[in-house]
Image (spheres, rainbow, N blue to C red):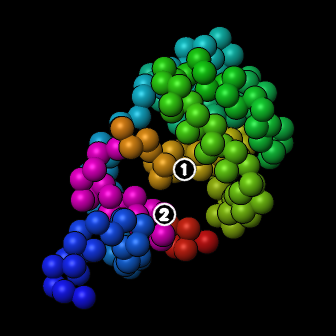
């Protein structure tokens, strides 16, 4: 094979054939917030049922997630009721593309239920008030899925963002168990 042929092969090689990232080298996560421009999460349709947990827009608590998931009939104990997820997301997100990616994420995460329950027991996460952490675990799991599967039209194709996504895909599950 000539040097020119080798160079052309390397230039057109698909990214998925690239080597896995070094999992001992965590990328700088502070610069990642602009990698996948997420749509605004509009929670106003849940204000009447969950307003006490949505004070000043601070909605990332176990109680706010549990309240929204309960109001939308998305959670039954620790089990996700996947057929209700899209109905919950439609009034929250103004992007059908992201609704579908989040639905896919929640479907993926429903298969991770036992691992999340085990993780909660292992970490002994404190109960806030009388609220379970399971809904927030599903929320975080689906958010990680969306980050890993951000639509190409939205994804910032910078080297730092691409490295961080590859690290997330190949390393985070190995590090967190």
Furthest-right residue in this view = 76
Q: Is 145 within the magenta? A: no
Task: Say what secondary structure mark 1 lies in.
Answer: helix
Above or below, 168 against 97 in this view is below
Say whether residue 166 is left or right of residue 163. right
Looking at the image, is mark 2 or mark 1 earlier in the sequence? 1
Residue at horizontal 24 percent and vertical 88 percent from the top: 1
The Cα atoms of the two marked residues, 2 and 1, are separated by 9 Å
Q: Nearer the viewer, residue 172 or 2?
A: 2
Residue at horizontal 48 percent and vertical 69 percent from the top: 170
Mark 2, residue position: 169
Above or below, 102 against 20 in this view is above
Q: Quadrant of residue 160?
A: bottom left
The answer, for residue 100, to whether it is visible in the render is yes
Q: Nearer the viewer, residue 167 or 128?
A: 167
Q: Quadrant of the C terminus?
A: bottom right
Above or below, 120 against 33 in this view is below
Q: Is 160 within the magenta? A: yes
Q: Position of residue 57 (x, y in %)?
A: 46, 24
Disc number placed over residue 41 in the picture, else none: none
Residue at horizontal 32 percent and vertical 58 percent from the top: 162
Secondary structure, magenta segment, majority class: helix
State which region is magenta: 155-171
Q: Quadrant of residue 61?
A: top right
Q: Position of residue 175 (x, y in %)?
A: 52, 73
Q: Residues within 10 Å of mark 1 (few under 14, many from 20)?
A: many
Mark 1, residue position: 145
């Amino acid at each position: 094979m000539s040097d020119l042929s080798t160079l052309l092969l390397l230039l057109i090689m698909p990214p998925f054939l690239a080597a896995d990232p070094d999992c001992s080298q965590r990328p700088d996560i502070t610069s990642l917030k602009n990698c996948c421009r997420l749509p605004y999460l509009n929670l106003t349709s849940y204000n009447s049922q969950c307003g006490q947990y949505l004070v000043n827009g601070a909605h990332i608590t176990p109680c706010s997630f549990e309240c929204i998931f309960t109001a939308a009939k998305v959670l039954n104990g620790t089990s996700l009721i996947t057929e209700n997820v899209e109905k919950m997301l439609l009034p929250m997100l103004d992007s059908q593309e992201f609704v579908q990616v989040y639905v896919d994420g929640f479907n993926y995460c429903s298969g991770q239920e036992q691992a999340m329950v085990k993780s909660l027991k292992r970490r002994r996460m404190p109960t806030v008030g009388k609220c379970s952490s399971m809904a927030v675990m599903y929320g975080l799991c689906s958010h990680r899925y969306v980050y890993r599967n951000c639509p190409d039209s939205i994804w910032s194709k910078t080297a730092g963002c691409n490295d961080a996504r590859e690290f997330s895909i190949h390393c985070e599950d190995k590090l967190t168990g």
